[in-house]
Image (cartoon, helix red, strand yellow):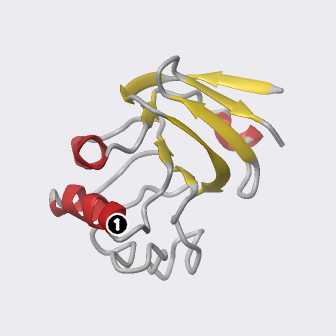
Amino acid sequence: MLKFKGRVLVEGIAKGEVLVSKDPISFLGDIDPETGIIIRRDSDIQGLTIKDKILIFPHGKGSTVGSYIIYRLKKRGCAPKAILNLRSDPVVIIGCVISEIPLLDMLPKEIFEKIRTGNEVVVDAYKGEVIILK
């Protein structure tokens, strides 16, 4: 069992399958807000869904409307179970707060070497831990 520590930004617990992007994500334009599918053509996870995943990406980018898109995804049942970042920007933080999506950041860069899309993890955003189960 491998464990990573991060900073808690939005508390909660989530368990599920990981979706990893090594690219920053803009919730306005990169993700279809109706389905949760990554629509940016040059994305390393283009065509995949963030719905019910533990979404890992370095940091957000783009418009403040992205906070509302995260909220919209949550209301439509298409949001991730948790978000993990190296560094969270205000858009992602606010979106997770209003949507009650657990959020950790300040995770070590090696998380991208150890966690792969499809792994199952537990995010404990009370203790600031990410545990790889498989």
* Disc 1, SS: helix
Is residue 64 shown left or right of residue 80? left
With respect to residue 13, does 28 lie above or below? below
Viewer-nearest residue: 101 or 4:
101
Q: Residue at x 52, y 71 (%)?
A: 43
- Measured as percent of width and height from the top left, residue 98 is found at 22, 46
- Measured as percent of width and height from the top left, residue 70 is found at 30, 59
Kind of residue at badge 1: Leu
With respect to residue 53, does 8 lie above or below? above
- Measured as percent of width and height from the top left, residue 29 is found at 31, 75
Outermost residue toward the left in this view: 64
With respect to residue 83, does 19 lie above or below? below
Outermost residue toward the top in this view: 127
Image quadrant occupied by the C terminus: top right
To which quarter of the image does residue 105 belong? Answer: top left
Viewer-nearest residue: 36 or 43:
36
Viewer-nearest residue: 103 or 59:
103
Is residue 106 shown left or right of residue 2? left
Is residue 108 shown left or right of residue 87? right
Q: Which residue is drawn at 58% across and 34% down?
A: 123
Q: Which residue is drawn at 75% across and 57% down?
A: 118
* Disc 1 target residue: 73
- Measured as percent of width and height from the top left, residue 41 is found at 48, 82
Image quadrant occupied by the N terminus: top right
Q: Which residue is drawn at 71% across and 57% down?
A: 117
To which quarter of the image does residue 20 belong? Answer: bottom right
